[in-house]
Image: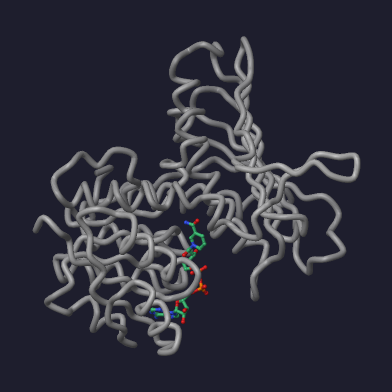
Amino acid sequence: MAVVVRIGVVGAGNMGADHARTLARFVSGAEVVLLADPDRQRAEAAAAAAGCTAVDDPLALVAAPEVEAVVIASPDATHPALVRACVEAGKPVLCEKPLSPTLTESVALINDLGARTSLVSIGFMRRFDPGYTDLRAAIASGSLGATLATHSSGRGVSAGPGSTAESSITQSAVHEIDIVPWLLGAPVEEVSWHAPRRSSSGDFADPQLILLRTADGALSTVETFLNARYGYDVRCEVLGEHGTVSLRQPTRTEVDSDLSRGFPYPPDWRPRFADAYRLELQAWVDYLGGADRGPLATAYDGMVASAVADAVIASMRSDGARVRVEVPQTGGGAA
Ligand SMILES: NC(=O)c1ccc[n+]([C@@H]2O[C@H](COP(=O)([O-])OP(=O)(O)OC[C@H]3O[C@@H](n4cnc5c(N)ncnc54)[C@H](O)[C@@H]3O)[C@@H](O)[C@H]2O)c1
């Protein structure tokens, strides 16, 4: 790969526009050359901000000779076909999570691509968030003793259009489904799903509570709450035999006023994880230039997350039954 990697970005929505701008402004060794979105106006606005050319056909972007590597940030259902097109064109691809909305599609994709799945990375960016990397280092240091439990919550202001109980798992909780076993260094073996009475602001189960049992014997709780209203808020506490370690709110300011002290919450995930997105994109570009993969998630990691999400949805459909996670054997291996 050349010293400067020429990148095409597919999707000019929240994430595509953000990734294109971050790559253009803050990532060394990268140049954004094309940006594709069927919504031409969006494509042009995001391309202008990133200083590149807009097109409306994602497959034309993948085929374009000036594009050496692709970032996919289009809707979840488009991921498998676009990943397949990139790999068939021999181009490395960083695909936003999830690899696909269903386990069946994830497995079919990995089986079809075989060894070429090594061209694929998945955007589980929490692995690059400084808070989560500190949590992982604290666990690995052994200073807290053996880990007994973790408690996570992922809350948003309001659910996006068309959200369902199932899509909250495959789109939102999938971040915790990836990060909890990554923190603990142990795969998820069993899950169960629970929910309280329905909130007045939602028309599907929200919040949802998930229990994850990992191979190290720890039990993890995950709350996912899309209509939490008050702000975008991600929490994680790890409970060890000798102490706990938690994420702090990553705010830079606090306000003292009216007999109280407080800090602002971001309206969505982009400010909260801006450092993580930048570090992830830099790590991917460095990897294309010959550096180690580091914590960049693989297609196999994406398929494992699909398997856990699938088990959570099976538990949802069987009134919270404990469901074993079955990770299918794939031809693509664990690379
Ligand atoms: N890693 C994270 O923290 C994170 C956060 C949010 C979203 N995501 C993921 O990023 C992806 C994009 O999410 P978003 O919030 O930017 O959505 P969005 O709705 O804001 O934008 C999606 C864009 O894709 C375009 N699009 C539709 N069909 C397309 C196609 N076939 N090819 C190319 N573009 C197409 C739409 O016109 C739209 O501009 C999703 O897969 C989502 O799950 C990841």
Depth check, front residue: 281 or 174: 281
- Can you say which quadrant of the picture contains the N terminus? bottom left
Residue at point 52%, 49% (across, down): 175
Residue at point 48%, 12% (across, down): 142
Q: Going by the image, does 78 lie left or right of 246? A: left
Depth check, front residue: 331 or 94: 94
State the image quarter where residue 235 is shown: top right
Which colour scheme appears in the figure?
A: one colour
Residue at point 43%, 70% (across, down): 17
Q: Residue furthest left?
A: 2
| Residue 180 percent coordinates (x, y) | 52, 36
Depth check, front residue: 76 or 61: 61
| Residue 261 percent coordinates (x, y) | 80, 39
Depth check, front residue: 58 or 5: 5
Q: Residue furthest front?
A: 257
| Residue 148 percent coordinates (x, y) | 61, 20
User: What count of labels does the image hold?
Assistant: 0
Identify whether 153 is placed above or below 169. Answer: above
| Residue 174 percent coordinates (x, y) | 53, 51
Residue at point 72%, 45% (across, down): 263
Q: Going by the image, does 304 lie left or right of 82? A: right
Q: Going by the image, does 327 lie left or right of 87? A: right
Identify whether 37 is placed above or below 158. Answer: below
State the image quarter where residue 170 is shown: bottom right
- Can you say which quadrant of the picture contains the C terminus? top left
Identify whether 38 is placed above or below 307. Answer: below
